[in-house]
Amino acid sequence: MNSVMISVTLYLVSVNILAGVIYMFGQKKAGLLWIEYPFVYAPLIIFQFLMPQFMSIPGLAETENSLKYFLFMLQGFSCGAIGAMILLPRFFVPAITTIEKLKVTAVSCLAMSTMYLITRWLFFEALRFLIPQMHGV
């Protein structure tokens, strides 16, 4: 199985478990709508489009394949956890109408996806700096 498929599979498992629990509890308490659930997939879509730019680390191709698979697994699981948290602001921000509820979810989706991408960019930039030093170059 290739690394992208592993990343997507781990994302789908983690986001559906975590978001499913949040959705089940939030459906009655916060009035979560079924149309808000697809927002949890936004971080994966954004990250998969930008992953080739993130993973273009020259030293990563020469290192063990296990590091590459570990990074993809880490990204899939962490992205899934962040994706599920997109539904949480609806518990804390009062919204009455459907449009208000969708606005809160859309803003939290954009904010959390952006923050996730910034942290991943910093992580991969650190790797870009550390991998050559690990090889003694």
Image (cartoon, grey):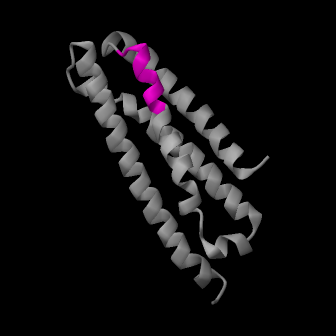
Q: In the drawing, does residue 3 fall left or right of residue 17?
A: right
Q: Residue at x 52, y 46 (%)?
A: 78
Q: In the drawing, does residue 24 fall left or right of residue 108?
A: right
Query: Which residue is situated farthest in the top direction here?
Result: 28
Q: Which residues are magenta?
A: 32-40
| Residue 108, image x, y percentages | 32, 36
Name above or below for residue 115 compared with residue 60.
above
Does the magenta segment cover residue 127? no
Q: Residue at x 38, y 28 (%)?
A: 87
Quarter of the figure that contains the C terminus: bottom right
Q: In the drawing, does residue 87 fall left or right of residue 131?
A: left
Q: In the drawing, does residue 2 fall left or right of residue 107?
A: right
| Residue 40, image x, y percentages | 46, 31
Number of labels in the image equals 0
Q: Residue at x 79, y 46 (%)?
A: 1
| Residue 107, image x, y percentages | 29, 35
Q: Camera-side residue: 88 or 62? A: 62
Main SS class of the magenta portion in the image: helix
Name above or below for residue 57 compared with residue 43.
below
Res. 24 image quadrant: top left
Q: Residue at x 34, y 40 (%)?
A: 110
Name above or below for residue 39 compared with residue 121.
above
Query: Which residue is situated farthest in the right direction here?
Result: 1
Name above or below for residue 117 compared with residue 17.
below
| Residue 104, image x, y percentages | 27, 28
Q: Camera-side residue: 7 or 136? A: 7
